Amino acid sequence: MIHAQGSVSYDSTLAKKLHADPYGMKKYVLALLKPGKATETDKKVRDSIFRGHMANIVRLANEGKLILAGPFADNKDYEGLFLFNSDNIQEVKEWVSTDPAVKANFLDPQLIVWYGSAAIQEVQRIHAAIQKEKF
């Protein structure tokens, strides 16, 4: 909890809700999305696949599985990233395999367990309050 003077006090209820360890941290699975080997050039097919990709992102986020997603700017080695609310790579492999862009081999996810702030889980709630337009 943040007080008027800027000081913060420990919120045990929130820490428990977010499965935070004593440092306020937890493990996630980070997916670095590399370009896949797909060679499809038909714009309508590609557009359809990436519309499905965006719909899948929204679905996984609504299910509480996906915390963050986004593309990288001006990077030839990586397309973007996903941050999943799980520390189980096998489980996340199943989740990411539902993505049409992964199925079509446009994206090749590299999965890594990552340790970060448990507060990251609150980003979606905050983002919803500042998002004027939907994808």
Image (cartoon, grey):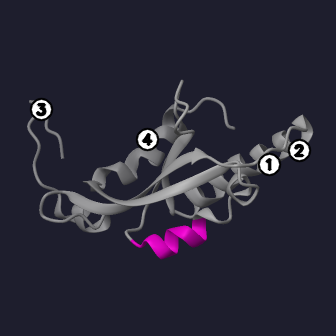
Q: Earlier in the sequence, mark 3 or mark 4?
A: 3
In the rendered image, which residue does mark 1 sit on? 49
**Residue at 38% from the left image edge and 54% from the top image edge:** 121
Distance from the alpha carbon under mark 2 to that under mark 4? 34 Å
Q: Which x, y percent locates residue 92?
A: 51, 68
- Count of marks placed on residues: 4
Distance from the alpha carbon under mark 2 to that under mark 3? 51 Å
Q: Secondary structure at mark 2?
A: helix
Q: Is residue 108 above or below residue 42?
A: below
**Residue at 74% from the left image edge and 56% from the top image edge:** 100
**Residue at 52% from the left image edge and 39% from the top image edge:** 78
In the rendered image, which residue does mark 3 sit on? 6
Q: Mark 4: which amino acid?
A: Ile
Residue stretch in magenta: 88-95
**Mark 4 residue crowding within 10 angstroms, few (<14) / some (14–19) / many (20+):** few
**Looking at the image, is mark 1 or mark 3 nearer the viewer?**
1
Quadrant location of the C terminus in the rendered image: top right
**Mark 2 residue crowding within 10 angstroms, few (<14) / some (14–19) / many (20+):** few
Q: Secondary structure at mark 1?
A: helix
In the rendered image, which residue does mark 4 sit on? 126
In the rendered image, which residue does mark 2 sit on? 45
**Do callouts 2 and 1 mark residues in contact (Cβ within 8 Å)?**
yes
Judged by its main secondary structure, the magenta piece is helix
